[in-house]
Amino acid sequence: MDVPVLTIDGPSGAGKGTVSRAVARHLKWNYLDSGSIYRSLAIAALNEDVDLQDIERLTAIASTMKLEFHCENELQVFLNGKEITPLLGTETTGHAASVVAAHPEVRATLLQKQMDFQQLPGLVADGRDMGSVVFPDALYKVYLTASAEERGLRRYKQLIEKGIDANLDQITQEIEARDWRDTQRATAPLTIPSGAIEIDSSKMSIDQVIQRVLDLVQQG
Ligand code: C5P
């Protein structure tokens, strides 16, 4: 039986994570946060002092690292049995993730790990290339975006809420730099997948976006 897949792609900070998790919870489908796979690899590489351009060592780590995801209320991630959840969301990790994610060999090595998430009753897959490369035949595809300023502001508020010191200008610049790396890279660049519905969340509440995506799935 075909397992239905809903892909939600878009730039950092567009709200993909929050929307995908809420939609997955509502539909009782599985959830793939593909960014956390790249982030986990980045953490493993930084832990081992591996040069982020050393493709051979990066692919070796990518093929042997053991990742476990627990998604009860919040996503918890374990790398080789050790919890790395608190490290996942940092700017250092996000930056390193986008550097390792630019290597085609690394992406190829992580492909199967992502495809394995396609399990009944369905999958919500969140990332940059879910609808274009990993699940090109997905039944439902969304491209979720927002202006860089709005995304910077949201990220800033998230960090401040967590008690993490943050600088809005710096965050917005980092978001723009990450967009540039993600859209300009040669392999699987961030792009609007064919057949995707585009949603600009700049002026929408998160609940409006969630409802819009649920309507798409429920109305077929
Ligand atoms: O979505 P998140 O911010 O966690 O992703 C971190 C980085 O991982 C992104 O900036 C991007 O470079 C990379 N990534 C990717 N393909 C995906 C998901 C994330 O290249 N499907």
Image (cartoon, rainbow, N blue to C red):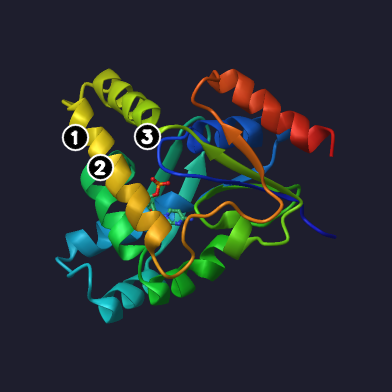
Q: Which of disc 3 and disc 1 is earlier in sequence?
A: 3
Q: Are marks 1 and 2 in contact (CB under 8 Å)?
A: yes
Residue highlighted by disc 2? 174
Reply above or below: 158 against 119.
above
From the viewer's side, name the closer residue of 79 and 13.
13
Q: Where is residue 190 in the image (x, y as percent from the top left)?
A: 48, 55
Q: Is mark 2 within 8 Å of ligand 1?
A: no
- Mark 1: secondary structure: helix
Q: Position of residue 95 (x, y in %)?
A: 26, 51
Pick whichever, 208 or 2, lies toward us: 208
Disc 3 residue type? Answer: Ala
Q: Distance between the residues labelled 1 and 3?
A: 12 Å
Asked whether residue 94 is in view, the answer is: no
Residue nearest the observer in this picture, 143 or 219 = 143
Is 98 displayed left or right of 18 in the figure? Answer: left
* Distance CA(mark 1)–CA(mark 2): 6 Å
Residue at image position (39%, 26%) is 150
Q: Is mark 1 within 8 Å of ligand 1?
A: no
- Say the numbered circle drawn on residue 182: none
Residue at label 3? 148
Question: Tags 2 and 3 in contact by the CB under 8 Å rule?
Answer: no
Q: Residue drawn at (50%, 45%), measured in percent from left and top?
A: 10
Alpha carbon of mark 2 to alpha carbon of mark 3: how far?
Answer: 10 Å
- Disc 2, SS: helix
Kindly identify the amino acid type of the residue bearing the numbered disc 2. Glu
